[in-house]
Amino acid sequence: MPTIHLTAHLRRVAPTGPTRVEAATLGAALDAYFETAPRVRSYILDDQGRLRKHVAVFIDGELLLDKQDLGRSVAPDSEIYVMQALSGG
């Protein structure tokens, strides 16, 4: 089962520590995670169901560049990291 990791900031509204979920895609993994932590959904997804502009997702160490690509496959042993994207100057 893929494992979802959140940064400390997001863990204020979500369970602490990594969470394993049953899923074959990123979107399904996030949906399964939101079932256990519904308050974190609005921090990660916008009202259109896309990743928010200032959220970065890494799947097995690779940055997800297309924030609409929630159909991206994840392996049973995938590590999914969700964090705030850094911006500004």
Image: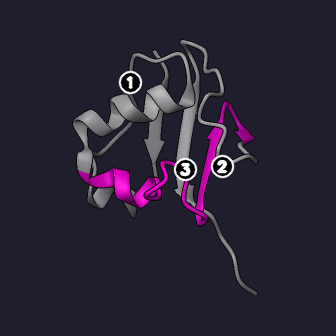
Indicate the amino acid at tag 3.
Arg
- Report helix, strand or loop for mark 1: strand
Report which residue position mark 3 lands on. Answer: 50
Measured as percent of width and height from the top left, residue 87 is found at 69, 76
- Where does label 2 land, which residue? 67
The numbered mark, 2 or 1, whose residue comes first in the sequence reads 1
Q: Is residue 84 above or below residue 48?
A: below
Q: Residues within 10 Å of mark 1 (few under 14, many from 20)?
A: some
Dot placed on the residue nearer the N-terminal end, 3 or 2: 3
Of badges 3 and 1, nearer the viewer stands: 3
- Disc number at residue 20? 1
Q: Quick check: marks 3 and 2 in contact, CB under 8 Å? A: yes
Image quadrant in which you'd find residue 29: top left
Could you classify mark 3 by the number of other residues whose Cα lies within 10 Å: few (under 14), some (14-19), or many (20 or more)? some
Residue 4 placement, left or right of 16: right
Between the C-alphas of marks 3 and 2, the distance is 6 Å
* Picture residue at 35% right of the left edge, 50% below the top: 41
Nearest to viewer (mark 2 / mark 1): 2
Q: Quadrant of residue 8?
A: bottom left
Residue furthest to the front? 48
Q: Residue at x 54, y 60 (%)?
A: 52
CA separation in Å, label 2 and label 1: 22 Å
Regarding residue 8, the answer to whether it shows in the image is no
The answer to whether residue 67 of the structure is visible from this angle is yes
Crowding at label 2, few (<14), some or many (≥20) Cα neighbours within 10 Å? some
Disc 1 residue type (three-letter): Arg
Badge 2 marks a residue whose secondary structure is loop
3 or 1: tag closer to the N-terminus: 1
Using residue 83 as the reference point, say whether residue 47 is left or right of it: left
Magenta stretch, residue numbers? 39-63
